[in-house]
Image (spheres, rainbow, N blue to C red):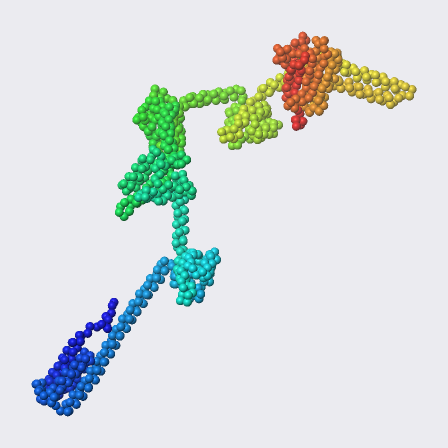
Amino acid sequence: MTKPNLSHWPTFPTVSHYAMAVLSVAVAIIAAEIMTRLLNTEPIALSMLCAVIFAAWFGGFSPALLAIALAVLAFHYYLLPPINSFTWKHNLLAGGVSEVSRLILFSITSLFIAFMVSAQKEATEALRRSSGDLQAAVEDQKRIEAALLQSEMHLTEAQRLSRTGSFGWNVSSGEIFWSDETFRIFQSDHATKPTVELIVQRTHPEDRAAVQQTIDQASIDGKDFDHEYRLLMPDGSVKHVHAVARAARDASGGVEFRGAVTDVTFAKETERKLRRSEAYLAESERLSRTGSWAWDVRRREFVFRSPEAHRLLGLDPERDAAPAQPLWDCVHREDRDRVIEMVRQALREKTDFEGDYRIVLPDGSTRYVHAVGHPVLSDDGEVTELVGTHVDVTEQHLAKVALQEAVDEIKKSEDRLRLVIDTIPTLVWRAGPEGIPDFLNQPALDYTGISLDQATTAWPRAFHPDDRKGMLRKWSAIRDSGIRGELEARLRRFDGEYRWFLFQAEPLRDQSGNIAKWYGSSTDIEDRKRAEEELRRSEAKLTEAQRVSQTGSFGWNVSSGERFGSKEFFRILGYEDSRSVTFDMVLQRVHPEDRAFVEQTIDRASRDGKDAQYEHRLLMPDGSVKHVNVVAHAARDQAGQLEFIGAMVDVTSTRRAEEKLHNTQAELAHVARVTALGELTASIAHEVNQPLAAVVANADACLRWLDRETPDLVAARRSAEWVIDDASRASEVVRRVRALANKTDIEKVPLDLNNVIREVIALVQRELSSHRVSLRMELEPTLPKILGDRVQLQQVIINLVMNGIEAMQPVTDRPRELVVRSGRDETDQVLLSVTDGGVGISAENANRLFNAFFTTKASGLGMGLSICRSIVEAHGGRLSVSGNEGPGATFQFVLPLHQEDAL
Ligand code: ADP
């Protein structure tokens, strides 16, 4: 507010001052007159003096002088006679000395007072004026100070808001000035004196050297500096500051820097975040294959394209510069016009656009792009820019195409499926959750002869009346269970014939798990039913057959322990009611002598999982003995578990028959042996004769030694010993012959086959020589033992040797040689062969040699080879014949090793 200027107060014009002097004198005269008249006093002098004072005070000294002149005049006039009358006085100069002195005194007094009053007034005026000036100056000062304070506040606020502090630095004095904001930036209190050291100390250790260098450099060359560095605050936080300083000269010519320091942490952080979000954006663009762009409509060029937008065009954003002009060329020729029109329309109508098109990359490949654009309008409503994105949707497009193809394929396969459903020889149906059919395939319709719209009611009626109730009950149970189920029932064909069907139903559930539909198939099992019937019948037959053949069947699942046995199986074991029979009870029936063997065999079979066949005896409760033959076949069930399926045959009668046969055979063999012995009589006689002759000779000699003059007892003893030896030899031959002739029981013992051969050869020696047959023995020295009956094996060998000798009978043109070999065959069994160079065997006879009563000899019995074969087979061996390369035949047999020697 502007204050009034006191020095320019409006003043009355000077004239008015003078007029006021005149007026005041006039008033004084009037007042003096009135008072004279009323009070009878003469106050003229006083009133004049008042008039002068007033004039002096009001108008100053000059008007006061006028008032004095007028007052003197009035006073003089007043003193002239007639006194106290203002009538005209003719003689103004008349008057006494006293009046004159009064006048002079009055004048001097008035002058003095006028001077004093006017001086006083002027002084007062001057004082008032200077006081006004002073007040104005003070007001100005206050105003300036307030403005200064305000601008300082603004500056401080501005510094605070802009986080910019100011500083001054006098290099020569080292004095540093900091603004409040600078203190705040450095987090120092105002009591701390700012120094270069403090600044360096606050600087981040990594930036300290650079800051020190900048300050040092500035202090040397006195040039402006501008640097950015970090501060490490006491609380561990880091600030980024930017300091700018301008150099100036101070009054003494020294260098002084004034500058600003800005806390750019926020800007730095923002920049970092911006960079990071830019990186994220670029990454998300890369991942989503989305490129962004901005198109300047007026300049007709791209003003921005993200790296991904480059990449989309097959360009490397780092290396290749994409042309700024439109890229219509990149757009697939077939899509180009459409794309141009789409963009133009967006520009024309100022609307967003969106569309798919193909672009062709420099390498010739095609990519599918989804483009979205948005026009940016200026204030005047014109389109200035188009901004938008390009998304590479090649994969999606290909997936879509593949999906479409898959859908087409599904459609096709659905058609095919429909065709299949309508052509398969199975009745297919579908029903709602409540079980009412709503679909039947063509075969179902054809079979029943009903139409699809009748399905709901006609289908249930097509079931056989006898089966319908059971079917409905089972169907309801399946639906209640909510899981796959099946039932069997007869279904009427269109021609009225009923056939058995297997109905299988499977529920289809919706997403919430509720049954949406039941799908089912009905398979014609008429044939199976018949087969089942057939099976039932054949099972009955089998049971009968088992009964007749005394064969029981059984099964045993090793893992589960499950067992079953046929009726006949338990009957053989002597159990009529099979239900309560346990495995232990089965084992109990096994003959005590065979039990260990049976248990071992079962154990081994279950361990090895191999087929087993064995024979054992049963001891029945009545003390009778049964022979059974068990055959068990190892197999795997559906779960891959080991199971045995087998048969137990009651072979008691067979065994008895065999026993009889065996006895008969033994008899026969005995007869044959005795017969053979008859043939060997000459040899035997010779065998016996030889030692007997020696006995006689040695006995003679002995006697002679005794009959001497001096009996030679030593020689006699030696002769007697020889007698004993020879007699033992003879007795051994006789023992062997007796053994052969004897009818002894078969006794299998471990034997060395070579020994058996040697014993036999001793017996046939004579036959060989009488038939002029030379014998060659090729015996393997270390032959493992076999288990056999000595006599029976001797019989076999004698037979073969004798046959060989006889076969060579007709041979006259070549040496007759018989070769007896022993050894081991390829399976390591013990082998014996007798090879002759005789007539050999004709092809037609080859198969009949071993038949009983087959002989080509006039006196032959034809039993020899037949008996030999049964003996060898009873030993677990095999007898065979083969032709030689040269003349003759070879008979050979193999025998298994004695168990102890087997390994
Ligand atoms: P037999 O000697 O009483 O005829 P075998 O059973 O011993 O009875 O022999 C049957 C037949 O086999 C003989 O009649 C003979 O024809 C033939 N045969 C046996 N051994 C030989 C052999 N080594 N060479 C040729 N034929 C043989």
Of the 4 image quadrants, the one containing the N terminus is: bottom left
Q: Quadrant of residue 521?
A: top left
From this viewpoint, is residue 107 visible? yes
Residue 483 point in image, percent of width and height: 40, 33
The location of residue 435, given as percent across then percent down, is: 34, 31
Residue 744's place in the image compared with 857, above or below, is: below
744, above or below 146, in the image: above
Residue 857 versus residue 182: which sits nearer the camera? Answer: 182
Q: Is residue 594 above or below residue 81?
A: above
Q: In which quarter of the image is residue 494?
A: top left
Q: Which residue is drawn at 35% across and 34% down?
A: 332
Please identify the residue farthest to the top as the structure is shown: 858
Residue 412: horizontal and vertical position, in percent? 37, 28
Task: Name the side, left or right, on which 131 lies relative to 395.
Answer: left
What residue is at 41 percent from the left and 61 percent from the top?
Answer: 247
Q: How many labels does the image show?
A: 0
In front here: 239 or 641? 239
Direction bottom: furthest residue: 97
Whether residue 109 is situated above or below residue 855 in the rendered picture: below
Q: Whole-percent x and y of residue 588? A: 57, 29
Residue 742, visible in the rendered structure: no
Which one is nearer the viewer's eye here, 616 or 481? 481
588 sits to left or right of 857: left
The structure residue drawn at horizontal position 34% and vertical position 31%, both measured from the top left corner, is 432
- Ligand 1 placement by image quarter: top right
* In the displayed structure image, the side of residue 389 where residue 815 appears, left or right: right
